[in-house]
Amino acid sequence: MKKLIAMALGAVVFAGVTATAQAGTLEDVKKKGFVQCGVSQGLPGFSNPDDKGNWTGLDVDFCRAVAAAVFGDPNKVKFTPLSAKERFTALRSGEVDLLARNTTWTMQRDTELGLNFAGVNYYDGQGFMVRKSLGVTSALQLNGAAVCTNTGTTTELNVADFFRSHKMQYEVVAFEKADEVVKAYDEGRCDVYTTDRSGLAAQRLKLKNPDEHIILPEIISKEPLGPVVRHGDDQWFDIVKWTLFAMVNAEELGVTSKNVDEMKKSTNPAIRRLLGVEGKFGENIGLTNDWAYNIVKMVGNYGEVYERNVGPKTPLGLARGLNALWNKGGIMYAPPIR
Amino acid sequence: MTTETRRIVFYRDEMLPPKPPPPATTGVIGWMRRNLFSDWWNTLLTFIGLYIIWLIVSWLVDFAILSAVFTGEDRNACLPKNGVEVGACWAFVNARFNQFMDGFYPTDQEWRYLLLYAVGIVLLVPLLIPKAPYKGLNALLLFGAYPLLAYLLLYGAPSLGLPVVETTQWGGLLLTLVIASVGIVISLPLGILFALGRRSELPVIRFLSIVFIEFWRGVPLITVLFMSSVMLPLFLPEDVTLDKVIRPLVGVALFAAAYMAEVVRGGLQAIPKGQYEAAQALGLTYWRMMGLIILPQALKLVIPGIVNTFIGLFKDTSLVSIIGLFDLLGIVQSALSDPKWSTPTTAATAYLFLALTYWLFCFGMSRYSIFMERYLHTGHKR
């Protein structure tokens, strides 16, 4: 009887041990037939499962875009939900090929941890939310305020830096979970709620009267969030990096998932190069020449993905702001394909 | 004339029927007078207690039923109506119910784990009823064949026409039950072995058992889980990854085994030395002595402790949600991040649902253990 249990266990373990990641990530990915993508366990608008169990969000769509570039099929991707603590281990040990988990690009992560950031797919920053009835219009008027925040995150340190550098007094009311923080803020235990601005927009939906609260204009930290790969595989790094650039370039050139087929007939050389009508840009990075066509056709350009997941028409309702294209007041900028 | 004096003697040959006790000391009223209103202090406490219960129950009934929202497509259904906050947002739980039950298990394959549940119940229930026959065969099926069947059904076997469902798609209650039942099934026999090992007279076995038990008891489960998910992949060769579900499965099982070993050891120590000596005098070998004389008595004594460990294990499975596994708690928390459903009451509703589900399972286990204790209570009443 025990032998049977042992055998069953052995079979499970054996099935669990599978070969992954050697030198060429692209080859490995092609061989196994899907991109293994590390995402957040649940972050509104960036990666969360919907009612049907499908993953949705800005980061998730980026994973799909990479799959579309490699395979011409956005569904050839598997998602590994990762906690913040295990995400880098999972990437470095080869458990995931790509990490798109709202990870802030910092020097230490980019260098010491042996990671490469393939760009920025969302410029976030820490902000403040207050009650309209407080009559505050700028974070500089918050002297003496009680500030609600999560414990043990950089948000707490950022607040400390901000208030100290402006010589203002404040009082921290910190909680472990975001749900507790928003509850405390809603019950009036503090005047200000601070976290990343995308998070503020998401937590605001949990307030009793979201309309009675405003997000102040000040941004007190830089949180460039982007997809990450491991050191040591430049080809894969290029593919991930240019997937993001292709999405931004497509938006800039006005190529959307709806008009991409007509755009193929365009005379604009930039569009022709993007969609693989001219040049061999896809083949040069180990893909097919219609790689960017597939991304735009199947997932969409950056603007479409943004609007679908976090834009003004979604419950989150985040305006483009910094994430608008460089020629529309934002800082989203992609090198040209040529 | 005989002077026969008829002595008139009267005696009752039956007792007077006892008079009913004063109505104020029996029944519900009597019980209440004795226990709730015996003096002014108790009376005061009773009223305070009643008031607190009233507060909780009325709030719960209002939140969970009266002002709750049962149907709806998205968050708009559960938003405050005309400035009045609504109660529980059951529409959310309803929309996500399938996900809470099985995570991302493909919908067209759901019959597989439902079938597994059904077979499990059919095998388990007769085993739990003391009078049901064929215990040996039943146990063999449950502990021998059933794990194999579970593996085939849950994971799949393409050769049998069952497409593979990767463990990353397992989740919700299904994953919780898998981790808990594997933990329970492995930890009990393993724990018994280690308990015997710790009391063994062979120094190497005793030493190894002590090392094992003290190591696993000395580290918190959360550390074990972190080690298994964060450190282990770095030690393994680069082309080997251990399945994400296997890691905590092994961790939880070994962890529970160490606790179980100490519970069983407590039972072993309670058995008088005479029992050992009597068994040895009969010429029984070590394993027969343990299997026939000592363990049946010892295990019976520690049923509360064993069930305690099981219940603890069942609840501890929720810790795996911090290493990115979507067990019942993990999937609920991840569902809470969907902006489509964020409202002031969604989180409270989801946690209420969670608490109810966990409570049902734990309460079931504890009731069964009480039943078993009473059933086996032969001759040890003191």
Image (cartoon, coloured by chain):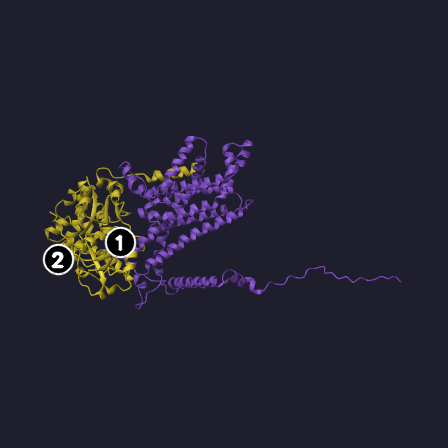
Chain colours: A yellow, B purple
Q: Earlier in the sequence, mark 2 or mark 1?
A: 1
| Residue sitting at the far front | B40
Q: Position of residue B247 (x, y in %)?
A: 34, 41
Tell me which amino acid carries mark 2.
Gly
Which circle, 2 or 1, is nearer the viewer?
1
Q: Dot 1 corresponds to which residue?
A: A150
Q: Amino acid at mark 1?
A: Asn
**Closer to us: A89 or A6:** A89
Residue B126 in view in this figure:
yes
Quadrant the N terminus of chain B occupies: bottom right
- Answer whether labels 2 and 1 touch (C-beta < 8 Å): no
Task: Give percent across and percent down for residue B340.
Answer: 28, 58
Picture quadrant where residue B378 is located = top right
Are discs 2 and 1 both within one chain?
yes
Quickly name the residue at label 2: A329
Q: Nearer the viewer, residue A170 or A325?
A: A170
